[in-house]
Image: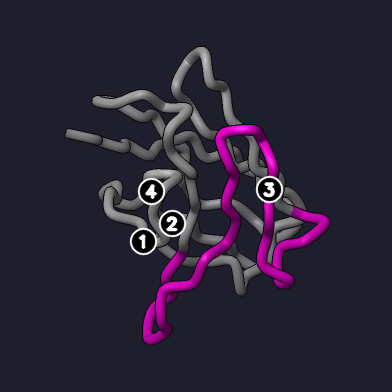
Amino acid sequence: QVQVVESGGGLVQAGDSLRLSCAFFGRTFSMYVMGWFRQAPGKERELVAQITSGGSTSEADSVKGRFTLSRDNAGNVVYLQMNSLKPEDTAVYYCAARDIRTTNYDYWGQGTQVTVSS
């Protein structure tokens, strides 16, 4: 059974940086696409960025140029580097995994809170 565990959230000021980590357990990491989602109060959950097993990434327009997603296939970890944070980035951030053969993210972490003050 796949398990993903996030860490690294916190309270920062606008313009600061944070790095979120997501540890992956249970199956062959290279067989999974990894994604970061976020959900702000009163809003729907949105995909922030995702990365294939080969390292190809895609990001939401709202974070392009500020957030960078990377993965360490040897360590089974995914990192979301968030720079130039804005108050509108405040949300619960979730790490998720999907098998490369599927389109749905089936495995989710518990979420980590990121709060950006102005």
Badge number at residue 82? none
Label 1 to label 3: alpha-carbon separation: 17 Å
Residue 17 in view (yes/no): no
Residue 74 in view (yes/no): yes
Q: Nearer the viewer, mark 4 or mark 2?
A: 4
Secondary structure at numbered mark 4: strand
Instruction: Determine whether 75 is above or below 112 in the image.
Output: above
Q: Which residue is mark 2?
A: 93
Specify the amino acid type for callout 3.
Thr
Magenta range is 38-66
Q: Earlier in the sequence, mark 4 or mark 1?
A: 4
Q: Residue at x 68, y 59 (%)?
A: 59
Label 4 to label 2: alpha-carbon separation: 17 Å
Q: Which residue is mark 1?
A: 104
Secondary structure at numbered mark 1: loop
Picture quadrant where residue 6 is located: top left
Q: Earlier in the sequence, mark 4 or mark 2?
A: 2
Specify the amino acid type for callout 4.
Arg
Where residue 91 appears, as percent x and y from the top left, is 46, 66
Q: Which residue is mark 3?
A: 57
Q: Is residue 54 magenta?
A: yes
How packed mark 1 is, by other alpha carbons closer than 10 Å (few <14, some 14-19, many 20 or more), is: few
How packed mark 4 is, by other alpha carbons closer than 10 Å (few <14, some 14-19, many 20 or more), is: some
Where residue 12 appears, as percent x and y from the top left, is 59, 52
Q: Earlier in the sequence, mark 1 or mark 2?
A: 2
Where residue 18 appears, as percent x and y from the top left, is 61, 42
Q: Nearer the viewer, residue 28 or 76?
A: 28
